Image (spheres, rainbow, N blue to C red):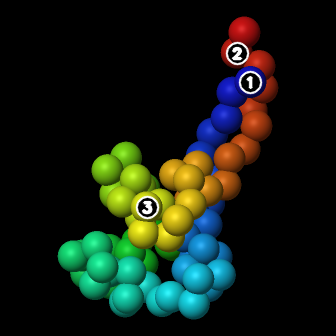
Amino acid sequence: MAYKVGKCLLQDLLDLRGMDQTQLALKMGRKPQQINKYITNRQRMSLEVAKNIASLLHCQMEDLYEWIEVGDNE
């Protein structure tokens, strides 16, 4: 099965954990504007950033994005 990356689900995860973009940015040592770029799909996270955000939010990296099934590559 093949997948493509859909929309970023970071805002939903932040809401579930009672955290805002600024709080996450502070914990990550990044600017809030950078977190907003991820949330608004203007920029995708690097694997390193995704791993660190997932660790902070106690989720899997795969949970940070919607995954759209695009077919079978077998």
User: Between disc 1 and disc 2, whose residue precedes?
Assistant: 1
Indicate the secondary structure of the residue bearing disc 2: loop
Q: x, y (%) of residue 31?
A: 25, 81
Q: Are marks 1 and 2 in contact (CB under 8 Å)?
A: yes
Of labels 1 and 3, the one closer to you:
3
Indicate the secondary structure of the residue bearing disc 3: helix
Q: Residue furthest left?
A: 29
Q: Quadrant of residue 53?
A: bottom left
Residue at (47% x, 60% y) in the render: 54
Residue at (43% x, 85% y) in the render: 21
User: Between disc 2 and disc 3, whose residue precedes?
Assistant: 3
Q: Is residue 35 above or below residue 72?
A: below
Q: Quadrant of the N terminus?
A: top right
* Residue kind at label 2, given as amino acid type: Asn
Residue at (77% x, 19% y) in the render: 72
Mark 1 residue crowding within 10 angstroms, few (<14) / some (14–19) / many (20+): few
Q: Is residue 50 left or right of residue 5?
A: left
> Observer-nearest residue: 12 or 7?
12
**Pointer 2 residue:** 73
**Pointer 1 residue:** 1
Q: Quadrant of residue 2?
A: top right
Residue at (61% x, 66% y) in the render: 9
**Pointer 3 residue:** 55
Q: Are marks 1 and 3 in contact (CB under 8 Å)?
A: no
Q: Is residue 71 left or right of residue 27?
A: right
User: Between disc 1 and disc 3, whose residue precedes?
Assistant: 1
Please indicate, yes or no, whether residue 42 appears anywhere in the rendered image: no
Q: Residue furthest top?
A: 74
